[in-house]
Image: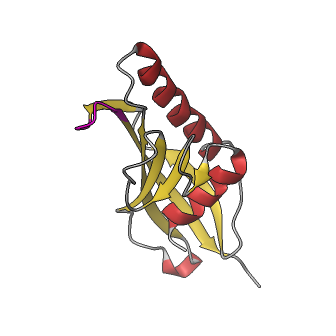
Amino acid sequence: MSPADELAHYLEGAGAGVLGAQSGWALAVGTEPDKPDTVITLYDTVGNVPLVDIDLTDCGVMLRARSSARSSAHAYRDAYAAALFAINELTKPEIIFGDVYQYIGVYLQTDLQCIGRDDNDRFIFTANFRIQRQPVEA
């Protein structure tokens, strides 16, 4: 699995949302769905060159959280809170998870930021992570 896919499954287990949900907070990977309005999407991004001698991969993931289309302060706060919850779950100290890859570090690279609204008037927040993972030894 890609890092974004594995982190999405991890966030689902942590209660951040449901993969492929049609209502409530949904989680998606690679493509942001049109519905529901409230969704956290994870994208694989650029990392650093793998450290082959110690079998460590340094990769990147972008988190994008989208609010409902309500034109009130609640929509902004809800999206911010959902993104912050996901960030806090992913960056817990000494968290190690994964079946194929062991995630030994998830580091916030950019602060959570609102990048505006989409064409449907939904707020968009983003944050970027650097991730270190290594294959699980059999």
In the image, residue 14 above or below residue 118: below
Magenta region's main secondary structure? loop
**Which of the two residues, 129 or 5, is positioned nearer the viewer here?**
5
Q: Which residues are magenta?
A: 118-124
Residue drawn at (48%, 56%) of the image? 28
In the image, residue 111 above or below residue 137: above
Q: Residue furthest top?
A: 73
Q: Is residue 120 within the magenta segment?
A: yes
Find residue 57 and report its horizontal and vertical position in percent: 50, 70
Q: In the rendered image, which quarter is residue 70 located in?
A: top left
Find residue 88 and report its horizontal and vertical position in percent: 61, 37
How many marks are shown on the rendered structure?
0
Q: Residue furthest bottom?
A: 138
Q: Is residue 94 visible?
A: no
Q: Is residue 30 within the magenta segment?
A: no
Q: In the rendered image, which quarter is residue 64 located in?
A: top left
In the image, residue 4 above or below residue 99: above
Q: Is residue 101 visible?
A: yes
Left or right: 29 in relation to 32: right
Find residue 114 and report its horizontal and vertical position in percent: 33, 29
Q: In the rendered image, which quarter is residue 121 located in?
A: top left
- The quadrant in which the N terminus is found is bottom right
Q: How are the colours assigned in the image?
A: secondary structure
Q: Residue furthest right?
A: 138
Find residue 30 and report its horizontal and vertical position in percent: 40, 62
**Which of the two residues, 138 or 67, is positioned nearer the viewer here?**
67
Residue drawn at (66%, 76%) of the image? 100
In the image, residue 96 above or below residue 36: below
Residue drawn at (64%, 42%) of the image? 89
- The quadrant in which the C terminus is found is bottom right
